[in-house]
Amino acid sequence: MIRLSVLYPSTEGATFDHDYYRDKHVPLAVKTWGLDGADIDKGVDGPYVAAVHFRFESLDAMGAAMGVPGTMDVLSDVANYTTIAPVMQTSEIVG
Amino acid sequence: MIRLSVLYPSTEGATFDHDYYRDKHVPLAVKTWGLDGADIDKGVDGPYVAAVHFRFESLDAMGAAMGVPGTMDVLSDVANYTTIAPVMQTSEIVG
């Protein structure tokens, strides 16, 4: 299993609409990529103001999901909730 | 629910023993803090070489867990698998 974590660093002067993120953006990504769900984080302490963690069966499955046409809509939706450039982390879930 | 993510940035010249981390260190932390388990990541692409995600019922529960005497043993065990200084992120799980 592969985890794709998208982490939004706290950034001076930037905003982040947590409600839109949880209610609109992440559901759009989940639907577009055909996933069962995702884990959504609202930062309390540390370098990140928000994050989401998606799971894919494999790197190939993640690549295939990213390749669907709807991914463009997911990416263009980012402007609706933040100006922060996210950090992307891909990991193998080993335990 | 609270997620505590411990993220190890890729660091020039540093090593990370993934087997020890998965088989010894994280189980020690889970046992010490009385948790059901944890999600362990091995970095594939992105800024982090490894990570773990723990869940706590609340910030108070996390604080209480960190306050047990065994936490010192967990922290002193870090030297057995890496020299990387981890990034700590505490978040509220909102979805």
Image: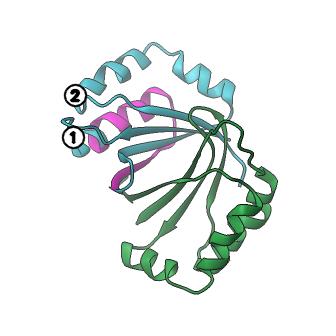
Chain colours: A cyan, B green
Q: Say which quarter of the image contains residue A18.
A: top left
Chain designation of label 1: A
Instruction: Inspect the magenta stretch and tell me whether residue A25 lies in it.
Output: yes
Chain designation of label 2: A
Query: Label 1's element?
Result: loop
Q: What amino acid does circle 1 point to?
A: Asp
Q: A21 and B53: which one is in front?
A: B53
Q: What amino acid does circle 2 point to?
A: Asn
Q: Residue furthest front?
A: B13
Q: Is residue B37 left or right of residue A75?
A: right
Q: CA distance from mark 2 to mark 1?
A: 8 Å
Residue A11 image point, x, y percent: 28, 38
User: What residue appears at the point 43 percent right and 77 percent down from the top-left corner?
Assistant: B63
Which comes sooner in the sequence, label 2 or label 1?
1
Residue B36 image point, x, y percent: 61, 72
State the residue position of label 1.
A17
| A50 lies above or below B94 | above
Q: B91 and B17: which one is in front?
A: B17
Q: Are marks 2 and 1 in contact (CB under 8 Å)?
A: yes
- Packing grade of label 2 (10 A; few <14, some 14-19, many >=20) is few
Q: Say which quarter of the image contains residue A44.
A: bottom left
| A58 lies above or below B51 | above
- Packing grade of label 1 (10 A; few <14, some 14-19, many >=20) is few
Residue A40 image point, x, y percent: 40, 48
State the residue position of label 2.
A80
Q: Residue furthest top?
A: A69
Residue B46 image point, x, y percent: 57, 32
User: What residue appears at the point 20 percent right and 38 percent down from the top-left corner?
Assistant: A15
Q: Is residue A41 left or right of residue B70?
A: left
Residue numbers of the magenta segment:
A22-44
